[in-house]
Amino acid sequence: MDSGDLNRALQYYKEAVKLKPAFPEAYLNLGNIYKALAMPQEAIVCYQRAVQTRPNYPVALGNLASTYYERGQLDLAIHHYKQAIAYDQRFVEAYNNLGNALKDVGRVDEAIQCYNQCLTLQPNHPQALTNLGNIYMEWNMVGAAASYYKATLAVTTGLSAPFNNLAVIYKQQVVLWCSIFCFFFWEITWKLYLVTMRFYGLIHWQLMDL
């Protein structure tokens, strides 16, 4: 939808809420349009009005939380994601997005719980799989990270992060094996050198006796 279509839709929804002020769906859609037009503060006001007219509106709460998250207001984002989940305990995207916000404020264990809950509801959720892989990658648990990245690629090839991070893991493994090979090669070469020098010394000593 181009900006012209968005602006026309904006006018229609404004008219709708003017005619029916207690119209939560119209406020939700109006907020979505403001967000698409890069007007986040106006979007927040609309989502808040949607929640005021229908307090148990998980989609509006989730969109409000996402807008706060994009503005870096992480505490507000976490609060509203939790509210959305309280009203809809099967809100898959809210669990994943709450995990992202919790991870960003350093509450990684809680983030993992959210990603796992997301996967309980939708086992093939690619973002949750990737997000778990990223955490284990940061913890240098490359085996666990690789398993989550592979699981992501089994359900989608539309995310670049799993490809990139798997490449990093495999590169690290190649470097590790090369380092091990070089170490043992050096050890064997050094020992052969010592044996050779001892043998040479023994021959030299025997020749001196002659």
Image (spheres, rainbow, N blue to C red):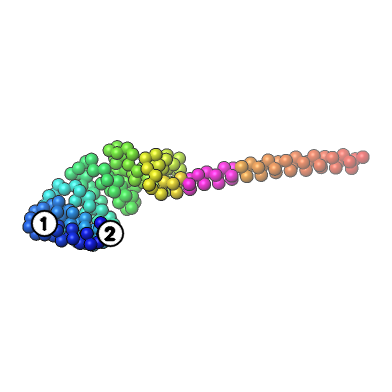
Q: Is residue 153 visible?
A: yes
Across the whole image, how many numbered discs are drawn on residues?
Answer: 2
Please state, as top left, top right, bottom left or bottom right, where the N terminus lies in the image.
bottom left
**Image coords of residue 68 (percent x, y):** 25, 56
Disc marking residue 71 = 2
Q: Is there CB contact under 8 Å for labels 2 and 1?
A: no
Whichever of labels 2 and 1 marks the residue nearer the N terminus, that label is 1
Q: Which mark is residue 198?
A: none
* 93 lies left or right of 25: right
Name which residue type carries label 2.
Answer: Arg
Residue at image coords 26%, 43%: 92
Q: Which residue is mark 1?
A: 16
Q: Secondary structure at mark 1?
A: helix
Relative vertical location of residue 52 with respect to residue 200 in this rendering, above or below: below
Range of the magenta residues? Answer: 167-180
Q: Is residue 39 left or right of residue 156?
A: left
Give the left or right position of residue 70, taking residue 176 as reference: left
Residue 116 visible, this angle: no
x%, y% of residue 88? 20, 42
Prevailing secondary structure class for the magenta stretch in the rendered image: helix
User: Is residue 189 rendered magenta in the image?
Assistant: no
The amino acid pointed to by label 1 is Ala
